[in-house]
Amino acid sequence: MRGLLCFSLITTTITSVVAHTRVYGVWINGVFQGDGRDVYIRSPPTNDPVKDITSSAMACNVNNIAVGTTLSVTGGDKFTFEWYHDSRDDDIIAASHLGPIAVYIAPTTSNGAGTVWTKVFEDVYNGTWATTRLISAHGQHTVVIPDVPAGDYLLRGKVPPFPCKAKAPPNTTIHSGNCCTSRSVLVVLAGTYTDSTPGILWNVYDQDPTEYVAPGPDVWSGSLGGSISQVGSA
């Protein structure tokens, strides 16, 4: 039986050198949960990038302050991030900015600090870059909520297009009920990357995209997958 999960979305700015994008709200099993900014999303004050990739803000951006609303789901539910640029009607990022998408999970008690993060979804390149498909999907991508031990967690969406040096993606607080799968492949996100870290810098014009490997660990074997597609409009 899948356990109850409760989410309080902590979002951060994901940007490239030019384009800026943040999370507007989320969908659960195709149902929009409303404008989440400063409601169930810890929204940063602007969509400016975090330029210091060694900064602690790389985990949860500059406004890592709790909000008052949580979202309840169960393991196996489809949890969809909806990104936006200036409004919900424009492309979330410039088409020239290409890159992968990932989602991480960590215990809420960690506040995102330390060796606590597990990658539960990743999409890099499959004929087209993940960000290209995200634009076509009106900024929506989905992760299936995994079964994890009872407790509170953060979910972190990551959309780092190229050229990129500093990206600080979204985090989500979840409460798990009585599931029993322990996470593995724990990593540090804040302060982990440098310019020489494989996958941080990539020339999309001269290098073969099929050879690109995104930064961070492999996707956890206990993850339940996800997708890049539009689930609805509101």
Image (cartoon, rainbow, N blue to C red):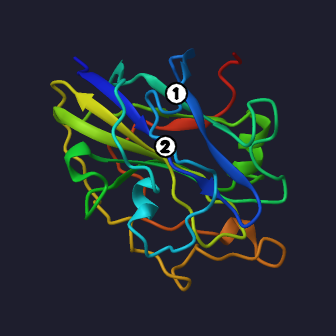
Mark 1 element type: loop
Q: Label 1: how many residues lie within 10 Å, few (<14), some (14-19) or many (20+)? A: many
Q: Position of residue 88 (x, y in %)?
A: 74, 30
Position of residue 72 in the picture relative to residue 197 (left or right): left
Mark 1: amino acid = Gly
Q: Residue furthest bottom?
A: 196
In this image, 141 relative to 8: left or right? right
The residue lying at 71 percent from left, 18 percent from top is: 233
Q: Secondary structure at mark 2?
A: loop
Quadrant of res 50:
bottom right
Depth check: give the residue in front, 214 or 233: 233
Q: Quadrant of the C terminus?
A: top right
Q: Position of residue 153 (x, y in %)?
A: 28, 40
> Can you identify the residue that label 1 sits on?
36
Residue 98 vs 86, above or below: the answer is below
Vertical relation: 94 (above or below) 177: below
The quadrant of the rendering that contains the N terminus is top left
Q: Residue under label 2, please give it.
A: 11
Q: Residue furthest front?
A: 45
Horizontal side of residue 146 vs 96, given as left or right:
left
User: In this rendering, is residue 150 above or below 201?
Assistant: above
* Between discs 2 and 1, the one toward the N terminus: 2
Q: Residue at x 68, y 56 (%)?
A: 125
Percent across and percent down for residue 121 are 48, 46
Query: Which of 203/97 is in front?
Result: 97
**The quarter of the displayed image where residue 77 is located:** top left
- Coordinates of residue 145 in the picture (x, y in percent): 39, 31
39 to 134, vertically: above or below = above
Q: Are marks 2 and 1 in contact (CB under 8 Å)?
A: yes
The kind of residue on which mark 2 rests is Thr
Classify residue 93 as left or right of residue 199.
right
Q: Compute the Cα span from label 2 to label 1.
A: 9 Å
